[in-house]
Image (spheres, grey):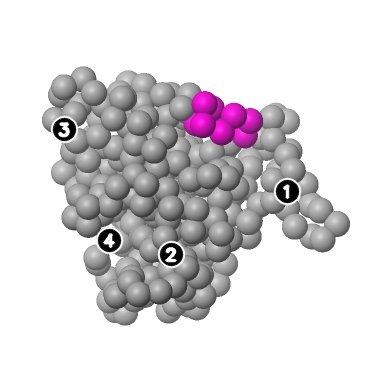
Amino acid sequence: MWFKQKTAEGNWQANGYLLAGGHHKYKKIEGIMANRKYIVGNWKMNGLRAQLSNIADIAAIAANHEGVDVGICPPVTLIAAAAQANPGFAIGAQDCHFAESGAHTGCVSAAMLKEAGAGYSIIGHSERRADQQEGDSEVKAKGEALRAAGMGAILCVGETEEERDAGQAIEIVTVQLARSFPAGASADWLTIAYEPVWAIGTGRVPDASDVAEMHAEIRKKLGELMGQGSEAVRILYGGSMNGSNAAELLAVPNVDGGLVGGASLTAAKFGPIIEAAAAA
Ligand code: PGA
């Protein structure tokens, strides 16, 4: 059971953990603190300044659904403008470098993202694991860099279609989670996203029973990796979530929210997912 309280300094704490910038909040249900739903949009390499108004529209919908945590991760070029235009709305990044600074041409550090207005970052997305050959140890270091900067992290894991067909999905995902799991993990800054690679951008979604099985395995692994407090770490589902399937996916046990790509680009598509989360 989780209790949220305000400290003498005016910061929020849950079971002794400081809640960084209100990043993780709890919903009170009959005296028990259950995880609030968390819906995050990943814009990937989409969006110019002309699309900033979409973020304002999404932030307005989010403001009408206070029981849900909502965020958007625009391309890095829009972070500062999006954060300035939408105070109080959770703007995040899609990736960060693990080093504080240095000779890493083209890369961006956690501190740079934070200064621009991002409160958290996605790390280990399967597109980066595949396209930029990012390995588990690098992803782990990125999480630790975000923690050091006082930011949140959304750590992505997921199996390929070949791995699922070979019956290896659970083994692949739980090993990936263990190897990319940052030190000092706690629910106030770390979120996990289960994203089957074959479901991303394809319109294909796993059966609810497969999602339930995987999320339960991830929850169990979190217990092994961090012990107390692991129940409060939110586990998002990602991969072709949309306004039509969100309610069913968000009703699955241990699905605490969604990481949404294509359907996060406009308020018309993202709004129904936020509404489904509010009703879940
Ligand atoms: P999708 O992407 O919703 O477009 O499938 C999800 C993701 O990659 O985070």
Which of the two discs, 4 and 2, labels the residue nearer the N terminus?
Answer: 4
User: In terms of sequence position, does the residue under pointer 1 or pointer 4 come before the other?
Assistant: 1
The crowd level at tag 4 (other Cα within 10 Å; few <14, some 14-19, many 20+) is some
The x and y percentages for residue 248 are 36, 31
x, y percent for residue 63: 54, 60
Q: Residues within 10 Å of mark 3 (few under 14, many from 20)?
A: some
The amino acid sitting under disc 4 is: Lys
**Residue where numbered disc 1 is placed:** 13
Give the structural element (helix, strand or loop) at label 1.
Answer: strand
Looking at the rendered image, the disc whose residue lies closer to the viewer, 1 or 2, is: 2
Label 4 CB-ligand 1 distance < 8 A: yes
Q: Can you say which quadrant of the picture contains the N terminus?
A: top right
The answer to whether residue 214 is above or below residue 24 is above
- Looking at the rendered image, the disc whose residue lies closer to the viewer, 4 or 2, is 2
> Is 101 or 74 nearer to us in this picture?
101
The answer to which of marks 1 and 2 sits earlier in the sequence is 1
Q: Magenta region: which residues?
A: 222-230
Report the disc number at residue 99. Answer: 2
As helix, strand or loop, the secondary structure at mark 4 comes to loop
Q: Are marks 1 and 4 in contact (CB under 8 Å)?
A: no
What residue is at 60 percent from the left and 47 percent from the top?
188
Q: Which residue is mark 3?
A: 161
